[in-house]
Image (cartoon, helix red, strand yellow):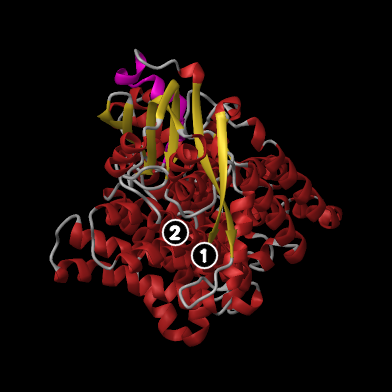
Amino acid sequence: MTHTQQEKSPGLLAISALGIVFGDIGTSPLYTFNTVIQLAGDSARPETILGLLSTLFWTLIIVTSIKYALFAMRIDNKGEGGVLALMSLLQNNQVKRQKWIIAAGLLGAAFIYGDGAITPAISVLSALEGLELVFPETANYILPMTLVLLVLIFAIQPLGTAKISQFFAPVMLLWFATLALLGIKSIIDYPAVLLALNPVYALTFFATHGHIGLLILGGVFLCVTGAEALYADMGHFGRKPIWIAWYTIALPCLLLNYAGQAAFILSGSDANNNIFYRLCPPALQIPLVILATLATIIASQAIISGAFSMTRQAIQLGWLPRMKITQTAEQSYGQIYLGTVNWLLMAVTLSLAIFFQSSERLAAAYGIAVSITMLMTTLLLYMAMRKIWHWNKMLSFSITAIFILIDVGFCVANMLKVFEGGYVPLLLAMLIFCVMFIWRQGVTRVSQSVAEKTLSVDEFLSSLRADGISRVPGVAVFLTRVQNVAPPVMRWHVKRNQALHDKIIALTIQVLDVPRVREEDKLVLTEKLPGFWQGVAYYGFMEKPNIPELLKQTPPLQACIDHESVTYYIGHESIVAKDGADALPRWQSYLFGWMMRNSLHVTEYYQLPGNQVIEIGRRIAI
């Protein structure tokens, strides 16, 4: 959390969290009950309605309230949550089976991207479809209006949302209050709907519906898409405020609204049209459409901001190429913008809206990727119980087995939707996973290639004295991938020029498996000889490296170095395909080389002054 956030009371932070954390799960009532009713077929029967409602109730309780809120949110990486933070925490604790942990973490992250592209499209479509009830003639304009609104949402991202985000919380508070009021109105008309709180109705429903029940389970899952945000956004607000917001506002309002939709049908209303909007008196349907549209815009904004944040984590942890990260608000570290992610996400989201054209069709594609992410989180949760909480196998397995059983059920149910559109998020997720895997493989091969030709710092210094290399006035910082070795760029410089600056810093930059590093621990310097320092700069995966600023703030260097005259030496690798059994597949080499050429330049990524940088190129075969 930022310093400003820490000063706020948990209650105020809980209200703020409504505008960021609960947008996705909070707009699920727009389409979830419609979807499960259509899947059920025999929707007019009271036992069917009560069974569906009971399933929605207990899914929200078990998945969101127990698994994520009570268990996952108790495991944080220095305050940060989410599947990548959990993966890093387990790596940092030197847990065995590292490959499995990494695979689970990366798959979880990739599948979040997969469904993240669908969320803005289905949310905005479902909100605007309410216009058809009041103005049937607008049916042909719903999709064009959706596309315009989606373009506007993505177009304003470079401007930042710091100023308008202060209105997110009041809007979402009004939205949740509206959900509750609409639900209460119908529950009063048919109070027997509250019988669905008994889980026997859910169990009986699935026992009597066979394979159709499994198909319906895929629709039920829509009520918890967005549950991952409780865990992922923990670093922004803290555990307690999110708990307060969920248990006192979001959960009760969602349960009341789902119960209200069920009561509306049980009281004799038609189940084939938009149930959510028909809860509202006709005179208030237009204001409700406007409020729903605002809520879906906020939900879309939360997904986009989450994609930016997760991408930054992946870049810092070395799983994605460097990209330009723009800070859109100085006072809030979480307010960032990544142009590449924004425009790619917009292109995919618009394509999905055009291809599926309605929220009902999009619902078939929605949820499949998130269900896999939830399963990956549960597997990592088991490892955390064993290795971080040090629980015994029986206790850890007993708890996670319940979650795994539910997660697997949802995964299987969603897999039935693969040919109806579920293949879209799957393909997107697998593409992103391949990009992550190939990038990491390539970076590892490059580092190994560099390390094979290294010379220790002590050996290098001895060779300087033996060869009588002259020292000239000046300050040079040589960046290197490998610690405790003489930077290859520095060796090349000495070989070509037979001279070296009288003040040298050989610097390695290392990103740790923690969100942030304390300022006093960021730079570790060792003076090997007078005027020759070997250093390691440490950053967390939520930080933006700034090497010149870091050097300026380091006491040993403040008095003896003129930072305006420092020359930064960096290496530039040109990737070529390698022959032999140990080479990467040629297509992977070409793809990695393309990503290297198009990634953000080291100078810009580490915020080096461009007029003080010398770049030395070399070819590396992988």
Q: Nearer the viewer, residue 247 or 478?
A: 478
Looking at the image, tell me whether mark 2 or mark 1 is earlier in sequence order. 2
- Residue 312 belongs to the span the image colors magenta: no
Q: For residue 31, which numbered disc appears in the image?
A: none
Q: Secondary structure at mark 1?
A: loop
Q: Nearer the viewer, residue 498 or 326?
A: 498
The answer to whether residue 437 is above or below residue 189 is below
Read off the residue under disc 1: 622
Residue 84, given in percent of the width and then of the height, sits at 40, 53
Residue 216, given in percent of the width and then of the height, sits at 52, 75
The answer to whether 565 appears left or right of 252 in the picture is right
**Callout 2 environment at 10 Å: few (<14), some (14 to 19), or many (20+)?**
some
The segment highlighted magenta reads: 542-558
The answer to whether 427 appears left or right of 407 in the picture is right
- Res 315 visible: yes
Q: Nearer the viewer, residue 353 or 348?
A: 348
Q: Nearer the viewer, residue 501 or 62?
A: 501
What residue lies at 35% left-to-right and 69% top-to-bottom?
199
Q: In the rendered structure, which amino acid carries the disc numbered 1?
A: Ile
Q: For residue 449, which numbered disc appears in the image?
A: 2
The answer to whether 535 appears left or right of 233 in the picture is left
Q: In the rendered structure, which amino acid carries the disc numbered 2?
A: Ser
Q: Are marks 2 and 1 in contact (CB under 8 Å)?
A: yes
Q: Secondary structure at mark 2?
A: helix
**Callout 1 environment at 10 Å: few (<14), some (14 to 19), or many (20+)?**
many
What residue lies at 41% left-to-right and 63% top-to-bottom?
374
Residue 261, given in percent of the width and then of the height, sits at 55, 59
What residue lies at 31% left-to-right and 41% top-to-bottom?
457
Q: Quadrant of the N terminus?
A: top left
- Res 190 visible: no
What residue lies at 29% left-to-right and 30% top-to-bottom?
525
